[in-house]
Image: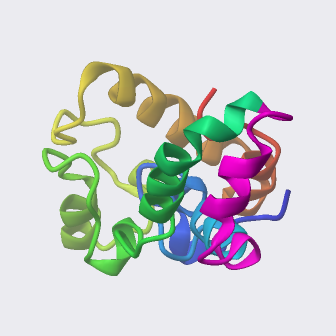
Amino acid sequence: MSVAPRHLVAPCGLDCSRCISCTEGRSVQLSRELLELLGENFHAYAARLQAINPALAEYPQFRRVLESFAQDRCGGCRSGTRVCLPSCNVMSCTSAKGVEFCFQCDEYPCTNTGLPEPVLKKWRTQNDRMREIGIDGYLRELAETPRYP
C-alpha cells in the first residue's frame, strides 16, 4: 500500500484516503475503474452467465453499491467537505489552536473532540503513536494497517 498524502490524514489521525467515501481515495478510484471496465451493458452478460456463476444473479444490487462507491462524497476532513461524524469537533479545534494534529496541542488529550467512545479510543491511540514515532513514521505505518480492522 502507498502512503496517504498528508492532506488526506485527518487531524485525529484517521486516513481519509482509505475511506469508502473519500473522493481522492483508492476505493472511489477503483470503483470507477471497475465501472468503466464493466461498461454499461454488463448486466446482459451477467444474466446469461449466472448459470455458470450464480452470484451474478445479484449483479444489479452489486452495480448499485459500486455506483454508490464511485460517487464524489467527501474530500477528507481537511477539505471542508467532510461527511462523516457530524459531532466531530477535531478539525475546527485544531484549526483554532493552529496545529496540524491533536497531539501537537498543549491541551492534548482533551475532552473537546465530540467523538463517540470507540472513535475516541482510536483517536487517543493514533495521536499517541504520532507523538511517539513522528508524523512521517505514522503515515508509513498507516499504509500497512487495514482501514476497517
User: In the figure, 41 relative to 123: above or below?
Assistant: below
Q: Quadrant of the C terminus?
A: top right
Residue 109 picture quarter: top left
Magenta-drawn stretch, dominant element (helix, strand or loop): helix
**Residue beneath the point at 23% across and 46% down:** 85
- Please name whichever residue, 64 or 139, is drawn nearer the observer in this view of the structure: 64
Residue 137 horizontal/vertical position (percent): 79, 54
**Residue beneath the point at 59% across and 68% down:** 25
User: In the figure, 72 relative to 140: above or below?
Assistant: below
Residue 124 horizontal/vertical position (percent): 44, 31
Q: Quadrant of the N terminus?
A: bottom right
- Please name whichever residue, 67 or 74, is drawn nearer the observer in this view of the structure: 67
Residue 145 horizontal/vertical position (percent): 75, 38
**Residue beneath the point at 62% across and 47% down:** 130
The answer to whether residue 138 is visible is no
- Tell me if residue 36 is in the magenta stretch: yes
The part of the chain drawn in magenta is 35-53
Q: Is residue 65 left or right of residue 58?
A: left
**Residue beneath the point at 34% across and 42% down:** 108
